[in-house]
Image (cartoon, rainbow, N blue to C red):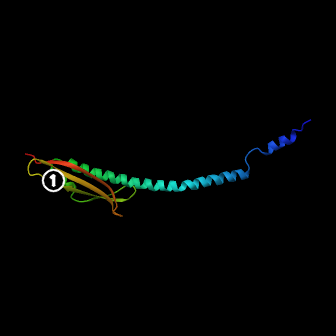
Amino acid sequence: MLDLMPHRRAIARDEGLGLIEIVVAMFLLALVALALLPLLISGMKLAVTNTTVAAATQLANDRTSAAQAGSPDCARVYAVADEPLVTTDARGVELKAVTTVTGECPTAGASTLKVESVVTRTDTDQTLATASTLVLVAVEP
């Protein structure tokens, strides 16, 4: 007759996970987490930079839109460029928008003025965004 009891005892001893298996699994999980950590850090830095660039782009577009809103009055278009606008984004980074108007007001008829806005960080003087447009101005008869 065949003795099945030693085989049943061996099966009973292999149930569940042992301490060594759990430690090895934790070690492998820690290695994977350490491998992904630089990716997470660079992603966070990029997200911070993109937030500031998005705020700068919005500011540049707002300044050119303000110049377009002054059309067809030449003096109102030039008034947008009188002085730089300094503001702070959501992260506390100070941004400076400088708007320049190129061209002359017409004495008769209509012409276009080139309006360009450049937004820089005040702490590093790094240019973050630029926007330009042409604005139609006219002398009303």
Q: Residue sitting at 52 percent across and 56 percent down?
A: 38
Count every numbered label the image shows and give the total: 1
Provide residue 78's location: percent of width, then percent of height: 18, 55
Residue sitting farthest toward the right: 1
Q: Is residue 32 found left or right of 60 in the rendered image?
A: right
Q: Is residue 18 found left or right of 34 in the rendered image?
A: right
Q: Nearer the viewer, residue 137 or 62?
A: 137
Amino acid type, residue under disc 1 in the picture: Ala
Which residue does the numbered mark 1 point to in the structure image?
A: 75
Mark 1 falls on what kind of element? helix
Q: Is residue 56 found left or right of 23 in the rendered image?
A: left
Residue sitting farthest toward the top: 1
Provide residue 85's location: percent of width, then percent of height: 27, 58
> How crowded is the residue under tag 1: few (<14 C-alpha within 10 Å), some, or many (20+)?
few
Q: Nearer the viewer, residue 19 or 103?
A: 103
Q: Nearer the viewer, residue 138 or 93?
A: 138
User: Which quadrant, please, contains the N terminus?
Assistant: top right
Q: Residue sitting at 71 percent across and 50 percent down?
A: 21
Q: Residue sitting at 37 percent across and 59 percent down?
A: 93
Q: Residue sitting at 34 percent across and 61 percent down?
A: 126
Provide residue 73's location: percent of width, then percent of height: 15, 49
Provide residue 95's location: percent of width, then percent of height: 33, 58
